[in-house]
């Protein structure tokens, strides 16, 4: 039957086309951004763009340093808060808690994941910003507004939790029970079993869960933009305002039209963000590869 | 057995294409986005216009003047709402615009500001505002009011590309741009009003429509205006005192007692003369019958001479 074989051939062809489209997608995005950023790269060298702290587009000065530092600070801060909480919660939910708690937790995670980021932003303005201004900033002895890296980090941490927690729970649930039982029967305590068996066995999964959380944090825009203060400066501490890369792009979307180099500079900032995420993902891939070997 | 499914999908596809193209060619949809300054007035116009033309759908969203211009030029919306001067670069891109109303940007503080009484008596001059917002020579309330107080001024500005910020910067220094304004960047006019009203030491700026309640003409709870000391004599004279009520303020804007900038014209922009008939009819209505709602909504109407010339633009002249 020629018809059947033809359909077979065709369908595998379609699948190949779809897969290669997906493979080419990051490349296409990267090339597009690069093409758009060439004018500003001709105007100023890539290194000086990244290392300069001077940002005044109308005078054609584009320095991304404050934005990169702000992005890194917000991301690291949110990860430092959300990472340990998620890891411990996932261990508790899978090892200690009664199954009913896990059944309650799943819809909670889904709700947290489903809340639109602008709602997180509003919540940040209503709750987190006043909290920072009224309770945390006075500890540092200053009159501050609360719009700060810290507020951005807290909001972002909450937003990353559902993604990381969900993956971590799956990771721990997929580790065979027998491993646990073997370790316990050899006389290890529960904590030793978790530390040496569970975490070790699940390391690749943990790394990819954390990787996803950080990637999410790096690219998050609206919620962070609403609480981080958007001041072009290298933040001296966590209570000062910052200006992460995604916020720069979102805020100045409208001004792109009028000034050609500005347009190009914003595209370059998108490219920088793309490269950071690319590098970061390669790093976590490498870590996964390393742990799989051992 | 899968075949009927595939065929039905293949059959459905063209019909989908046809149905979507139908809905766009009937052109009963008008979409607007952009300046928060124009948003309340555009909503009012939309409501009144829908009473006369029930089958026209009007979608209005905010996002700031910058978004309005970008969306209009990209063809994402029919009309962009715009609230600062149109730059030469934007004119080169072939942007088309008409003036639809006037309003102003006002310097705002929290109603719980500890220096409120003193501020309302003395006001601040444009020089002082420049020293606060641009050069940062004045950083405490004591410096602004020539007293010994050391409370810091918490500066707020708009984070999104905004006409209000651009107009305010222009008032402080003629060649200043939004990027020259210092301070914490907050997204959107409502966001800025909220941030300023909650922080007793804050200073910011807002469009008239977000300082006053359109229906009552009273100031919104929590927010107050710093009177502008136009003649720079260190106090607010009776002719500089018109901020109590939206009505008296609008009169001052119309009569030129409130300086311009920060008073400014508001525009609708699009990528060339709109071709959509529904959009043209809507614009024509705004420039004629629609003008009666301008005052009601808390704005200053445009001079009749300007309205006439804008109507001519609609005819492609």
Image (cartoon, rainbow, N blue to C red):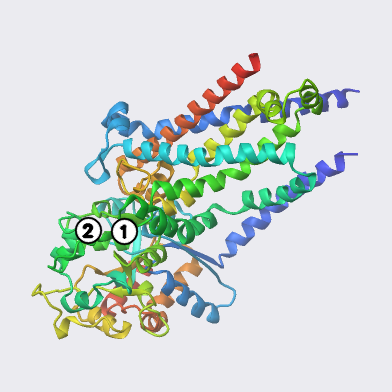
Protein chain holding label 2 = B
Instruction: Mark yes or no: residue B316 visible.
Output: no
At which x and y percent is residue B264? 26, 69
Residue B198 vs residue B25, the one in the foreground: B198
The residue carrying mark 1 is B157
- Above or below, B230 relative to A167: below
Q: Is residue A220 left or right of residue B158?
A: right
Q: Which comes before the other along the chain, label 2 or label 1? A: 2
Determine whether the residue tagged by mark 2 lies in a helix, strand or loop. Answer: helix
Q: CA distance from mark 2 to mark 1?
A: 9 Å
Determine whether the residue tagged by mark 1 lies in a helix, strand or loop. Answer: strand
- Above or below, A73 relative to B241: above
The tally of labels here is 2
Residue A277 vs residue B114, the one in the foreground: B114
Residue at the far left: name it.
B233
- Above or below, B37 relative to B217: above
Query: Which mark identifies residue B133?
Result: 2
Residues marked 2 and 1 touching at CB (< 8 Å): yes
Protein chain holding label 1 = B
- Residue at image x 52%, y 41%? A81
Residue at the far top: name it.
A293
The N terminus of chain A, quarter of image: top right
Q: Is residue A262 left or right of residue B19?
A: left
Query: Which mark identifies residue A7?
Result: none
Q: Residues within 10 Å of mark 2 (few under 14, many from 20)?
A: many
The C terminus of chain A, quarter of image: top right
At which x and y percent is residue B159? 36, 54
At which x and y percent is residue B257? 18, 79
- Residue at image x 29%, y 43%? A233
Instruction: Mark yes or no: residue B7 visible.
Output: yes
Q: Quadrant of residue A22?
A: top right
At which x and y percent is residue A229? 37, 52
């Amino acid at each position: 039957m020629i018809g059947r074989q033809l359909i077979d051939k065709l369908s595998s062809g379609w699948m190949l086309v779809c897969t290669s489209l997906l493979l080419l997608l990051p490349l296409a995005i990267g090339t597009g951004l690069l093409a758009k950023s060439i004018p500003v790269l001709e105007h100023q060298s890539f290194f000086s763009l990244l290392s300069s702290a001077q940002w005044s587009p109308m005078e054609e000065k584009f320095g991304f340093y404050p934005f990169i530092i702000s992005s890194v600070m917000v991301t690291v801060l949110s990860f430092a808060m959300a990472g340990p909480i998620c890891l411990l919660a996932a261990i508790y939910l899978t090892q200690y808690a009664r199954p009913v708690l896990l059944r309650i937790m799943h819809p909670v995670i889904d709700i947290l994941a489903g809340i639109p980021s602008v709602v997180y932003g509003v919540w940040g303005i209503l709750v987190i910003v006043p909290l920072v201004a009224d309770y945390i900033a006075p500890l540092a002895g200053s009159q501050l507004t609360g719009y700060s890296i810290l507020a951005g980090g807290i909001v972002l941490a909450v937003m990353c939790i559902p993604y990381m927690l969900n993956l971590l729970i799956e990771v721990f649930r997929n580790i065979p029970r027998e491993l646990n039982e073997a370790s316990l029967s050899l006389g290890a305590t529960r904590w030793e079993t978790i530390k040496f068996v569970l975490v070790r066995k699940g390391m690749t999964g943990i790394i990819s869960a954390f990787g996803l959380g950080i990637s999410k944090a790096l690219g998050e825009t609206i919620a962070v933009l609403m609480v981080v203060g958007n001041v072009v400066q290298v933040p001296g501490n966590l209570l000062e305002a910052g200006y992460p890369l995604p916020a720069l792009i979102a805020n100045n979307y409208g001004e792109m039209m009028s000034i050609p180099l500005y347009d190009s500079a914003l595209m370059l900032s998108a490219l920088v963000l793309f490269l950071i995420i690319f590098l970061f993902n390669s790093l976590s891939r490498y870590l996964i590869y390393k742990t799989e070997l051992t | 057995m899968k075949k009927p499914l595939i065929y039905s999908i293949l059959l459905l596809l063209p019909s989908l294409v046809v149905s979507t193209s139908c809905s766009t060619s009937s052109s009963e949809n008008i979409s607007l986005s952009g300046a928060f300054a124009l948003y309340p007035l555009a909503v009012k116009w939309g409501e009144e216009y829908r009473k006369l033309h029930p089958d026209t759908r009007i979608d209005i969203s905010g996002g700031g003047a910058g978004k309005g211009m970008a969306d209009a030029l990209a063809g994402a919306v029919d009309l962009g709402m715009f609230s600062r001067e149109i730059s030469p670069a934007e004119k080169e891109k072939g942007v088309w615009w008409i003036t639809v109303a006037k309003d102003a940007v006002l310097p705002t503080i929290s109603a719980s500001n500890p220096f409120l009484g003193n501020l309302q008596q003395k006001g601040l001059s444009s020089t002082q505002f420049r020293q606060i917002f641009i050069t940062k020579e004045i950083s405490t309330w004591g410096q602004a009011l020539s007293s010994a107080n050391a409370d810091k001024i918490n500066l707020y500005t708009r984070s999104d590309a905004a006409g209000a910020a651009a107009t305010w910067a222009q008032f402080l220094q003629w060649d200043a741009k939004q990027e020259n304004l210092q301070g914490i960047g907050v997204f959107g006019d409502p966001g800025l009003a909220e941030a300023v009203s909650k922080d007793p030491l804050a200073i910011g700026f807002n469009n008239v429509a977000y300082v006053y309640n359109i229906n009552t003409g009273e100031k919104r709870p929590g927010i107050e205006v710093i009177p502008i000391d136009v003649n720079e004599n260190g106090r607010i004279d009776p002719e500089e005192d018109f901020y109590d009520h939206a009505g008296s303020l609008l009169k001052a804007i119309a009569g030129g007692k409130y300086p311009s900038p920060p008073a400014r014209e508001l525009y609708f922009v699009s990528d060339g003369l709109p071709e959509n008939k529904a959009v043209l009819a809507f614009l024509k209505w705004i420039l004629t019958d629609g003008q009666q709602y301008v005052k009601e909504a808390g704005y200053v109407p445009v001079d009749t001479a300007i309205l006439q010339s804008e109507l001519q633009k609609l005819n492609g002249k």
